[in-house]
Amino acid sequence: MHNVLKRFTSLAMVLFLGIVLIACNGEKEYQIPEITNPDKTDNGQVFFETDDFKITNEELFNSVKVNDGLNQLLTMVDSELLKSYLDEVTAQEIADKRILLTYNTDDEEVINDMEEDERNKYITNFEESMYLMGYTQESEYQDYIRLVIAREKYATEYMTSDASAEETWHVGTKAIADYYDQAYSNDIQSIKIKFESEKDALDVMKSYNLISKQGKLLLYTGTTPIDEVPSFALDETNTKELTEAELLEFFVKMYNDVYSGFRDEVAENSTFEELLLEEDLSLNYEDLSSLNKNLAGFIFFTLGNLKDYKADSESDVYYTYKPVKYYAGRDTAYYMILNLSGQEKADLSNFDGTDEELISIIGQDLFDEFKQTIIDINLGGSNFISKRMADLRREHGFIINDPYLAIDYKAIDTDYVESETGHKSVIASYDEVEITADELFDYAINRNLAMYIVHASQVKALMAAHFESVYCIGVENCETDYNKNESTKMLEHINAYDSMKTQFEESMYADYYTFDDYLYLAYGVRNKDEMIYNYYVKSTLQPIYIFDLIKANNYDVLNDLLEMIQPYYDNYFSLDSTHLLIYVDRDENGNPDNYKDFYEELTDKTTFDNLLTDLENSIRDYLEVEDNSFTTLVEEYKDAKRNDATWGEFKSAGIYILTEDLSSKSSLTYATTINQYEDSFVVRLQELYNEYKLEANLELDFILDDELLETSFGVHLIRVEKGDDFDMPSAKYEMAYGEDNKPSFTVGIENDLDQISFEQLRLYAMYRFSVLSFGNIELEDLYGFTRPEIPSGVLDALKEFSGKFHDALYVVGYMNIGIINQLLDGNMNESMLDIYDGQEADLMKELQDISDIYYRQIFLELDVR
């Protein structure tokens, strides 16, 4: 789906100059398939006509081919090759796949947790994407999804069949056994203790007189407090090795020190057998690997285990004698680990048996699970399904006779062998079936005629509007033929083309491609003619055409921009901010757990609330001391002992803190935080900004929030300073006058208000257009103005509040809105209703719907609120 949309918005917008009927391919003549009677001089072949231009069948067919002609062709072919698979697709499968395509997930819990607005956005985006591909009705959605599923079914059957037995991606008994052997890990029992810092871990060890020496964990037995004994004085006279029972006891003690505040305590006198039954000591490889792959690898595959050690004392060491670190993401913790048991799984490294024999070893459930897992991995692989479909088409002798569609197809099937002769009418064939250019044309326009007409109209509309104003200045007879046009701009295009061709011929790409192939791959054009018009001329004329749309109806579109700008005034702030985040991390992945979910699951919220209040008070007391900061607080907190008078009880409760500089790149503003931060955080920044602007606070170096703010990450203590643009840029300006009472800037730029006026935005639109089209046209001759002169302060305000909104109009989508408006006043040739299954009214409705989609995507998607 995405490839189709990308093709529709590529540089290759339209091919309107016709096709070469006979091409020279080496020493052989190559015929390019044509639709019936493509003679453009025949008025009967005009498909659609406006007051300014006409679209012929041939031009429309070229639009089909350059946009998504290959996808349409493959849909025609695959629908026949996969007919039996299509018949097997159920309504439930379609419904399930639609959910996945809509939300990018089929996890009901994830979807249900979405806000209604977010779910609706996904639904709208899916439906609009389908509409732009030509699937406008519910039944058409189902047709599209049915083919998606049928292709998956075929690929799945193929990868599990004997026909693919020799392929690396084959899913058979050996692949399942290998997956079990290499990827599967069953749960183990392990005492894993996470510490915030190395000092934190060493302090806990010292509290039990434990030291790390000579690759072992030793017990200090001396009478002098261990903190007073230098490391060199710790030797065989005052240390002893731990017995197995002592090791277990001390690891359990350390475990309880760290976790007893929020997990059930483990009895210190637990036997080895009892520890094997402790649920909290069970580790799952996939779960741990998803959080910290290196740590999971160490625990599961490097570190030994006590169970094996008891059976064979020569086996690997089963515990860490000193704190170890395995950083992942934000996780900068240290760990002490004692593995109680290891993985208990069969050795299938040399398995070469049957399904039945494998099932007898690993069980039916695991067999089925691994088989489906490998299938899903394959289906999710890059281009896997498209490559399997290419294999199927190759088996049926699939040939494409159009050289440019063949170039596109080689991106899917790198082994595809191109036709050596082409054909005058048959565009593709397989088995005994021939698909003519007429049939592809008929199929495609009945799928998505509106989009093809829009794209076929683009260059024509632009040229009809402004070719003369750029390429025929001061010329009596305007030549549209670039070979005869002697304008400076056209010569510039020709020189650019010649320079690019020279660079290509001197590059390594010339060894692999012809220059025309390169043009098609890079720009979606087939020759010099198309490059000149469809790329250079189009790029030049597009901003001029769009400016015409902006200034239409007295610049009416600017009223929409002013409406969009208003919230950015109402909510303006500019602050430099750091924050302290108080959070929990029960899954120990180094990232905050969802605080709202955590809090809801608490059985004793009152106790936690009181603890949080005490922590807040302790933090504020700490920050009252000169030179103390969020950064020093976090370091002190990490290193604090669990019996620390200030921080110990909070650490024991499993509460973490971190700090971030949120303005390390630039000051925070409403525009940069909305939709990037949670709404409550943005609102609080606004409130702090308004508080800062009070006269009593204006001279303060910073403001520390007097409340904690809760978000899904945890609770935040926010500190703010004045941002780079603390004072909101103002559009207020009183005109200055020079000699002879001449205004210093363009009349209309004056304004009594801080907010941008319509007239100021109109002048800014003229100003930006003059920048974007600089050198392309004579502004005064065409539009009657020179570049407006705008005071720097007003220009800053205009850029701040309207810059991104205004410049977003200079996109293909907005140009297409203008082109559609022209098409809505046009007419379809009645004779073309023999080709098009719908009526002209159906086409007009689809054109209007597409225009509405473009409008929504430009404006609503731009306004990220």
Image (tube, rainbow, N blue to C red):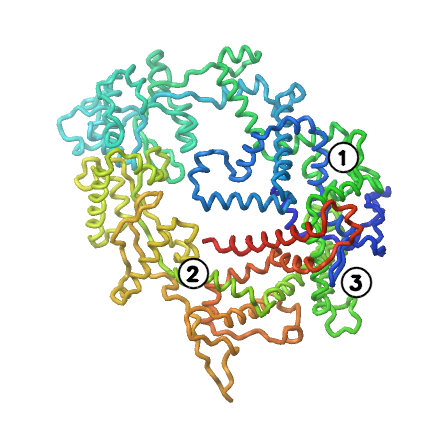
Does residue 106 appear to the left or right of 601 in the view shown?
A: right
Quick one: 552 or 700, which is closer to the camera? 552
Residue density around tag 1, few if under 14, some if 14–19, many if 20 or more, within 10 Å: few
**Corner quadrant of residue 697:** bottom left
Measuring from the top left, give residue 486's x and y in whole percent.
77, 68
> Quadrant where the N terminus lies?
top right
Residue 19 badge: none
Q: CA distance from mark 2 to mark 3?
A: 48 Å
**Corner quadrant of residue 767:** bottom right
Give the residue type at disc 3: Asp
Q: Is residue 343 above or below residue 722?
A: above
Residue 67 visible in the current orientation: yes
Measuring from the top left, give residue 46's x and y in whole percent.
79, 54
Measuring from the top left, give residue 312's x and y in whole percent.
36, 12
Q: Secondary structure at mark 3?
A: loop
Task: List the residue tagged with mark 3.
Answer: 481
Task: List the residue tagged with mark 1.
Answer: 417
Disc nearest the viewer among 1 and 2: 2
Task: List the residue tagged with mark 2.
Answer: 568
Q: Earlier in the sequence, mark 1 or mark 2?
A: 1
